[in-house]
Amino acid sequence: MIDATRGVLFPERLPTFTRLEPIGRVAALVRWYWIPEWDLAPGQASAQQLVGYPAVNLVVEPGGVSLSGPTTRSGRRELTGRGWAVGALLRPAATAALAERPEALVDRLAAVRHPELHAAVAAAMSSADAGERHAAATAAFSAWLEATVPPPAGDALLANAMADLLLQDAGILHVGDAADRLGVSPRTLQRLARRYVGVPPAAMIRRRRLQEAAQRLRERPDADLAALAAELGYADHAHLTRDFRTVLSFTPSEYRAVREP
């Protein structure tokens, strides 16, 4: 089941925002689709701050198509006026097929030319009914991906399995844990992460833990920070605080304080 706000630091500030699961064969290529839509009055702005997933997104907007790479810091975007986007959070198997060097996309947004994808998704998003346009847009996106990306096999499927463990299994605290579970060496995971994701496997674990920490602070604002750090596998409270400050530029205590009414 998709968590609609995982990685979103301030969900209450979001415009209309939807995450949808892929259906059928494209599930091996896309973790989920995400669709924000906004219509803000003149002079208004909506500032969005995200702890992005360590993955590449393929994004269609009215102005074109882009590949958005994994980030090493929190991302921020200020929305104004009226607009929409339809993004696909790519699984590693699709990333390697669509980005020649994923590591070159780290902390970058690169415009790409996929006119057929843009035309199909933009046409779908012209529907007046939100449910219809979302279904049509993701169907068009899926059809394009299935026609463009070969069915994954071999290392591509192993890279998908690696990402599933590192990003979803809270019991995986070290790269060696995932290597043991998959029956490969840590060096193999390093190679797969470089080719299919763009960031090291250890960075993927750190990002998952940081997302979990932020989410738990939203759900349990009175949580003891030392206990929370221990739950998530941090060495201590100071380690959690250092990770927060490095990526988000504020501490867990400051994040909790700014969210208090």
Image (tube, rainbow, N blue to C red):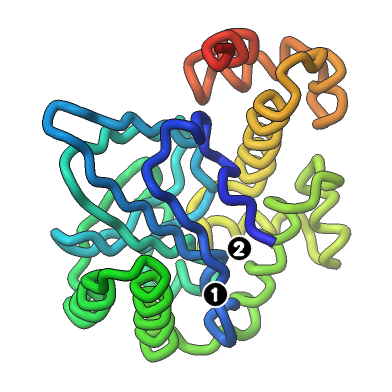
Is 82 left, or right, of 182 in this rendering? left
Tell me: residue 215, above or below residue 68: above
User: Residue at 71% of width from left, 29% of height from top?
Assistant: 219
Tell me which residue sits at (23%, 45%) in the image.
Answer: 39
Which of the numbered marks, if any, corresponds to residue 192? Answer: 2
Residue 58 lies, with reference to residue 36, above or below; the image says below
Tell me the quarter of the image containing the C terminus. Answer: top right
For disc 1, the marked residue is: 22
Q: Is residue 248 left or right of residue 128?
A: right
Q: Residue 109's spot in the image, x, y percent?
A: 28, 49
Q: Does dot 2 land on a helix, a strand or a loop?
A: helix
> x, y (%) of residue 92?
54, 66
Mark 1 vs mark 2: in front: 1
Total numbered labels:
2
Say what amino acid the circle numbered 2 marks: Leu
Mark 1 lies on a secondary structure that is: loop
Instruction: Write the residue at 17% across / 35% down.
Output: 41
Identify the image quadrant of the N terminus.
bottom right
- Identify whether 123 is placed above or below 166: below
Q: Nearer the viewer, residue 249 or 179?
A: 249
Closer to the camera in the image, 176 or 230: 230
The residue nearer to you, when weighing 20 against 126, is 126
Q: Residue at x 66, y 33 (%)?
A: 215
Along the viewing direction, whichever of 28 and 98 lies nearer the viewer: 28
Instruction: Pinpoint residue 61: horizontal percent, then vertical percent.
Output: 23, 60
Q: Residues within 10 Å of mark 2 (few under 14, many from 20)?
A: many
Give residue 20's position: percent from left, percent from top: 52, 65
Task: Give amino acid for label 1.
Answer: Pro
Q: Residue furthest front?
A: 129
Q: Is residue 3 left or right of residue 36?
A: right
**What separation in Å lies between label 1 and label 2 (alpha carbons)?**
23 Å
Q: Determine whether, in the image, residue 209 is placed left or right of residue 32.
A: right
